[in-house]
Image (cartoon, helix red, strand yellow):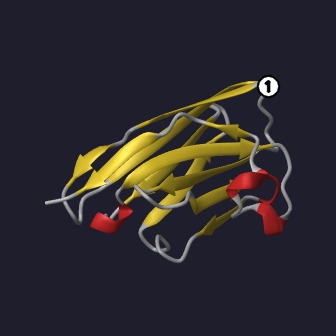
Amino acid sequence: QVELVESGGGQVHPGGSLRLSCAASGRTSARFVMGWFRQAPGKEREFVAVFRQNNNMMYYSDSVKGRFTISRDSAKNTLYLQMNSLKPEDTAVYYCAADTTLILTELRNPDAYDYWGQGTRVTVSS
């Protein structure tokens, strides 16, 4: 079993920054694919970013590219999401997700991930 615990959410003004963390424990693996998804009220859960350890590749949704940065500290088993230039439309509950192996076409699909955190709320408003 794998446990994921997010932290770092909060309320910020438009243009502000936040850094989310996701601490993984349990039967983790250096080959884990770990990513961030978000869900705004009344909307479906959507892909934000993913870090693929086996080839050190990062993928982003078009809506956050250039503003968000995903990174992973393998020694600490922790995934980060640095969010800059936040907009009101970034308001959502952000979830950390992980899975052992995913092919490229599955990375952006939340249904492909087996492990999820409880979520951390991000509110961007003036």
Q: Using the image as rendered, state which of residue 46 and residue 22 is in the foreground.
A: 46
Local secondary structure at mark 1: loop
Q: Quadrant of residue 88?
A: bottom left
User: In the figure, 8 relative to 76: above or below?
Assistant: below
Q: Quadrant of residue 23?
A: top right
> Quick check: 80 left or right of 83?
right
Placement of the C terminus among the 4 image quadrants = bottom left
Tell me the kind of residue under disc 1. Answer: Arg
Q: Position of residue 74 (x, y in %)?
A: 67, 38
Please tell me how crowded label 1 is: few (under 14), some (14-19), or many (20+) other residues with Cα within 10 Å: few
Q: Residue furthest left?
A: 126
Q: Position of residue 89 (x, y in %)?
A: 34, 67
Is residue 85 something that shows in the picture?
no
User: In the figure, 51 relative to 121: above or below?
Assistant: below
Mark count: 1
Q: Position of residue 106 (x, y in %)?
A: 79, 62
Please give the name of the residue rendered at 47% of the width and 48% of the height, measured from the top-left corner: 94
Q: Residue furthest front?
A: 42
> Quick check: 60 left or right of 87?
right
Please give the name of the residue rendered at 57% of the width and 52% of the height, measured from the top-left corner: 36
Q: Position of residue 116 (x, y in %)?
A: 64, 38
Q: Which residue is mark 1?
A: 27
Is residue 27 something that shows in the picture?
yes
Placement of the N terminus among the 4 image quadrants = top right
Q: Quadrant of residue 58?
A: bottom right
Please give the name of the residue rendered at 80% of the width and 35% of the height, measured from the top-left corner: 29
Please give the name of the residue rendered at 74% of the width and 48% of the height, measured from the top-left corner: 113
> Quick check: 67 left or right of 2?
left
